[in-house]
Each structure stands twice: as C-alpha cells, then as structure tokens.
Image (cartoon, rainbow, N blue to C red):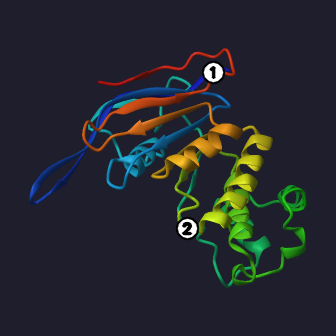
C-alpha cells in the first residue's frame, strides 16, 4: 500500500472580533491507500476542522495537505464526506436520494442505475428502493447515506461522527453494516469520534491506527497501533 494522503505540519486558527482561536497546531501524518484511520477527541478539539481541511473546505494557515504528492486543491481526487446526519431528502425515495449526487454532477447514466441496483441488493435495501426516508430505520438511512457517498467514487472517505445521533444498540448494529461496506469496497477512510469505545470497536474490524486529538496540546498522539500487519505508520506529535 502506497501513501495516499499526507498532512504536513498543518496549523489552523479561527478568527473573530475577539481575536484568534487555535484549532490545530503543527499536525503531520500520512494515510496509505486502503487504510482506515480513527481519530478520537472531545468536542471542540479540532476533529471536524481537520476533516474540513482534508476535504478542501478550509485552507490551512501553515503547512500543506497532499494526495498522491499533489496539493489537495489540484489533485483532482474525489473526497467523500459523510456527516453526522444522513441528510436524506424526505420527499425523495431511497433510489432518488442515491441518484442525487450523480444528478447534480450530471453523471447519472443507465449504467449508474445498474450499479445502484447492485449496491441496493448487496447491502439489503433493494426492497426499500421506493420507500421514503421516514419509512427507513436508522441503520437503513445510514446505509443509504453511505451508498450515496460511495456512488461518487471517492478516493478518500471522511466520516464525521456518523453514528452520534443513534442510541447505543443501534449504533453497534449500524457500525457493523457500515464498516462491512467500507471493507468490502476497499475504501481509504478517516473516522472522527468523541467515543473511544467506538474507535476501539472499529479497530477490531477495519482500523489500522487510532489517534487522539488533544484540546490542550492540539496535537495528534498514537494511542492504538495495529500490530497485526507488517506495515509501518508515521505520525509526528509534540
């Protein structure tokens, strides 16, 4: 597995009339193609900021973010972003929610419908393709949201606490589904969560490394490193 994503000495500050608030300071790490990275930290420590930087929604104050050694803005790579809420449109069916991204990018074709049908069948939603989101369980909604994201063929999948709105039992059931899909599709993914147990649970199945983002030092620290594979991982911290 070669290096896909590199974050090189990235810092970011939020600015307001009251002054400057540091969010991230001198963060460096890399993620190899096909790896799954979990980042753990409490609310307000900069987890979502880091994902927004990787997605290109924010620009770092210092440092750089690269995909295949090209700046994130000019890499031409697709970044998939799965948010805390599924954001399914309530007036559209499951099928029409899945086609939304392709419609917006004018990429919806007959072959797209074949792929969508295959994914709906594979991941247990084909009998609900005409159902509205209100008729789906929490787990089904999350599966639909993930499939919608995967249909855009992202090179990197960003997961911003996608299970935070679910109760514990549903979260366990849904996470089994989601991690199974990500592993089957062989996607490179980064999960952020405030729940260390969730990160450890995913580590058993798919995660290669778990990092902790501290609100005090605003740095990344390795807390769990997968030793089952003979692959070396690198992260800098202070």
Residue at 47% from the left image edge and 35% from the top image edge: 211
Q: Position of residue 149 (x, y in %)?
A: 66, 56
Q: Nearer the viewer, mark 2 or mark 1?
A: 1
The picture places residue 118, in percent across and down from the top left corner, at: 90, 57
Give the percent coordinates (x, y) of residue 81. Answer: 56, 53
Choose the circle earlier in sequence order: 2 or 1.
Answer: 2
Residue 106 in the image: above or below residue 232: below
Residue 45 visible in the picture: yes
The circle drawn on residue 85 is 2
**Residue at 67% over, 14% down:** 230
Say left or right for 212 vs 78.
left
Frontmost residue, 44 versus 148: 44
Give the residue pinned by disc 1.
Answer: 227
Residue 145, labelled with which disc?
none
Residue 83, compared with residue 51, is above or below; it is: below
The x and y percentages for residue 14 are 23, 51
Q: Quadrant of residue 202?
A: top right
The residues tagged by marks 2 and 1 sit, at their Cα atoms, a distance apart of 33 Å
Q: Quadrant of the N terminus?
A: top right
Q: Are marks 2 and 1 in contact (CB under 8 Å)?
A: no
Q: Give the quadrant of the C terminus.
A: top left
Left or right: 119 in relation to 89: right
Does residue 99 appear to the left or right of 65 in the view shown?
Answer: right
Image height check: is 184 above or below 31?
below
Q: Residue at x 64, y 62 (%)?
A: 171
Q: How many marks?
A: 2
């Amino acid at each position: 597995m070669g290096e896909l994503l590199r974050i090189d000495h990235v810092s970011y500050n939020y600015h307001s009339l009251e002054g400057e608030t540091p969010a991230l300071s001198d963060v460096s790490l890399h993620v190899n193609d096909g790896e799954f990275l979990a980042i753990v930290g409490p609310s307000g420590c900069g987890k979502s900021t880091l994902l927004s930087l990787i997605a290109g929604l924010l620009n770092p104050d210092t440092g750089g973010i690269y995909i295949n050694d090209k700046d994130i803005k000019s890499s031409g790579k697709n970044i998939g972003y799965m948010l805390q809420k599924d954001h399914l449109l309530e007036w559209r069916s499951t099928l029409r929610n899945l086609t939304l991204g392709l419609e917006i990018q004018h990429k919806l074709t007959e072959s797209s419908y074949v792929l969508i049908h295959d994914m709906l069948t594979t991941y247990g939603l084909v009998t609900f393709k005409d159902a509205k989101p209100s008729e789906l369980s929490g787990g089904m909604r999350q599966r639909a949201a993930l499939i919608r994201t995967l249909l855009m063929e992202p090179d990197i999948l960003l997961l911003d606490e996608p299970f935070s709105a679910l109760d514990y039992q549903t979260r366990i059931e849904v996470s089994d589904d989601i991690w199974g899909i990500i592993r089957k599709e062989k996607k490179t993914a980064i999960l952020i969560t405030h729940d260390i147990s969730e990160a450890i649970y995913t580590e058993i199945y798919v995660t290669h490394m778990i990092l902790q983002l501290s609100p005090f030092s605003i740095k990344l620290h390795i807390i769990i490193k997968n030793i089952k594979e003979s692959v070396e991982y690198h992260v800098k911290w202070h």
